[in-house]
Amino acid sequence: MTKIIRTICLFSNEITAQDIEKLEKISQLLKKNNFSIQTKRICLSGYKTQINDKELFDKGILLGLGEQTFEELKENFADFLKSENRAINLDLTNENITTEHADILFKIIENKPDNTFRFTYGFNLPTSTPYFPSAKFGQKGFSVGLQPTDLSENCKNVAEWLEKMKIVWEEIDLLLKSVDGYLGIDSSIAPLFQDSSSLVNFIKRLGLDFSHSATTDIYTTISKFIKENNPKPIGLCGLMFPCLEDFELAEEYEKGNFNIERNIFLSLHSGLGIDTYPIAVNQNKERITEILKLVQQLSNKYKKPLSARFVSDGKAKIGEKTDFKNQYLKDVIVREL
């Protein structure tokens, strides 16, 4: 089995040498047991401006500064725009959403488009998920999240893949339960790239067309299992549909098979919201406001964690191809929302 840990995330008030050492120890323990580690992360309990985030990045650590209120973000916005390695989420759960909230996204697009990748709007987000930019501090400790799509390689059906996931969760839980500060496993499905790492690729391997799959019970089956069979659940524990990180989903987007309506529909019954969804520099701001209002209403109505992460390269207009220069994002021709 290809066992990939997408992220080990440590939650702390400050960054200490002990924290960095602890992350490395956890990483080594998992590596020793044939897990490959993609990223190590630290999420802090509040926004700190004095941290050298580039220095952390050079050590292979991504920095999260958690959940921001609208007022907090306004105060720290200039610092966020300058940063190279800071991820945040703006909590809109109970905000009266206006174009002012959409303006924030467009200011990032105009001044530091790379940072759209590290910014999301959040609604009812739980604490302690290791996935950025949705991560937020709840207590000290650490959690892990996988890239479990790779476990689907050679699986002939959904049940086979789910059983492999359960085996791996139990293995991780056994390895980490005696480690001080272990909070749990976020069993979210986090696809990436193509082939066995792509969720859409798995759907196709089962003989299903992606558009057809949207109105079957396949995604609800997966999301039910990952919530109910995780030995130590923490964080989001849902199904991600990252439009540009799952390269085969990006191809469906280009064909017109993954519009914003379908994204929201899939998120509502199985997923976690709008993720790495391309936005044009000349997109109408009112449209973003409308979408944010809808996602807020759905999240509150169903008491469901949702987020909205739109990404831009700072140049591509509607009908033009993006040039992200980001290994995690597939370039596409941007459609109007």
Image (cartoon, rainbow, N blue to C red):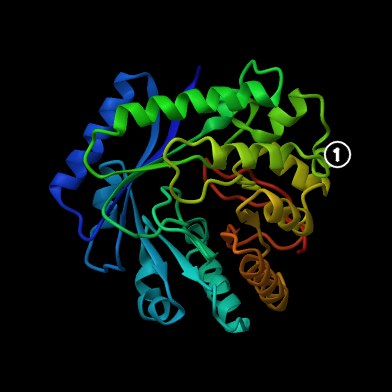
User: Residue lying farthest left?
Assistant: 17
| Residue 26 in the image, given as x and y percentages of width and height | 26, 33
| Residue 90 in the image, given as x and y percentages of width and height | 48, 70
Q: Name the one closer to the observer, 301 or 62.
A: 301
User: Residue lying farthest right?
Assistant: 212
Depicted 110 relative to depicted 35: above or below: below
Q: Residue at 55% of width from left, 22% of height from top?
A: 164
Quarter of the figure with residue 174: top left
Q: Name the one closer to the observer, 221 or 9.
A: 221
| Placement of the C terminus among the 4 image quadrants | bottom right
What residue is disc 1 on?
Answer: 212
Q: Name the one closer to the observer, 170 or 152.
A: 170
Depicted 211 relative to depicted 166: above or below: below
Q: Residue at 56% of width from left, 26% of height from top?
A: 150
Q: Residue at 83% of width from left, 44% of height from top?
A: 215
Depicted 170 relative to depicted 299: above or below: above
Q: Specify whether 87 is left or right of 198.
A: left
Q: Specify whether 331 is left or right of 95.
A: right
| Residue 9 in the image, given as x and y percentages of width and height | 34, 46
Asked if one can make out residue 238 in the rendered structure from this viewpoint, the answer is: yes
Q: Name the one closer to the observer, 172 or 73.
A: 172
